[in-house]
Amino acid sequence: MISPRQLMRRYQLSKIIVLLLLLVLVGWVAIPGYLTGKWPWTNPPPVTNLKQLKTLRQQGLKFSKLSGWKVLHVQKNVQIGGRKWLVQEIQNQQTVAILLLLPQNGPKDQPQVEWLDIRGFHRWQTDSDRALKFTVESMPTSGKPPATVEALFFRSRRAEQTFAVLQWYALPNGGSTATSRWFWEDSIARVSNRRISWVAVSIIVPIQSAGDIELYRPLVKGIGEIVQAQLMAETFQL
């Protein structure tokens, strides 16, 4: 049986190992920058799929007939907070939903407080915040494992309207509602002179004011899977 003292030693050892790995990573990035005077955070590598991101910003996301959804309306440059979003109204046989997209706009553009901006813009009152996790198959030719998305799912209210909302930052290999995942993946990518591009996604579905929001989980999850898969196939594909 392992004693508490042994457990504490193992815990401290693991913390030391993690700290050493972080120091190695920082040194790997900082030392070449110190010697050359070119710091990766002041002169970041280019975003290789910036053209695709700009196309997304101008044209929006395309939905195939197989997805069951079609685009009814596209509105560009909708000012929400300090950002200009693209807004798409989409529809299937039973539901109309709103898709908000904010693609990365350049090598120094970072995700910030987009979710607060959206809540403030719509003057929402929110509740029932919870995680919604889903996976999307990667391109068959990539040889990569399925992409995992950890999104935020909640209910919002405004005046007489109620919505189910799903939000996350889409990345080439998945996504998360937290900016920290992009930050760490992008920091590691910069070591090898690469970047991790991102697209902020917010899906808004009108729902009944009463009832369990879990009833709408399959619907918003299905839309989220389609959006993430399409971004991986077109916007993030080089």
Image: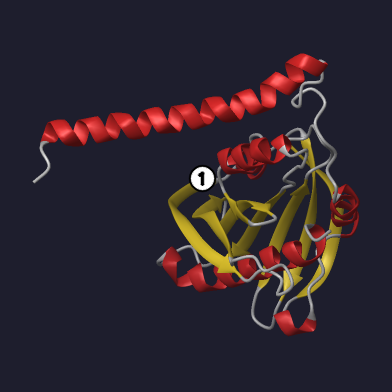
Q: Residue at x 74, y 67 (%)?
A: 230
SS for tag 1? strand
* Residue underneath mark 1: 125
Q: Nearer the viewer, residue 112 or 44?
A: 44
Question: Which sits in the foreground, 98 or 237?
Answer: 237
Q: Position of residue 26 (x, y in %)?
A: 60, 25
Visible residue check, residue 47: yes
The answer to whether any part of residue 162 appears in the image is no
Q: Is residue 13 left or right of residue 202?
A: left
Residue under the point 67% across and 53% down: 170
Residue positioned 45% across, 51% down in the render: 129
Q: Which image quarter is the C terminus in?
A: bottom right
Residue 58 pos. (x, y %): 90, 54
- The image shows a total of numbered marks equal to 1
Q: Nearer the viewer, residue 234 or 77?
A: 234
Local crowd size for mark 1, using a 10 Å CA cut-off: few (<14), some (14–19), many (≥20): few
Q: Position of residue 109 (x, y in %)?
A: 78, 35
Snapshot colouring: secondary structure
- Residue at 52% x, 55% y is 150
Asked if residue 170 is positioned above or below residue 33 in the image, the reply reads: below
Q: Amino acid at mark 1?
A: Gln
- Give x and y (percent) for residue 84: 81, 42
Vertical comparison of 129 with 46: above or below? below
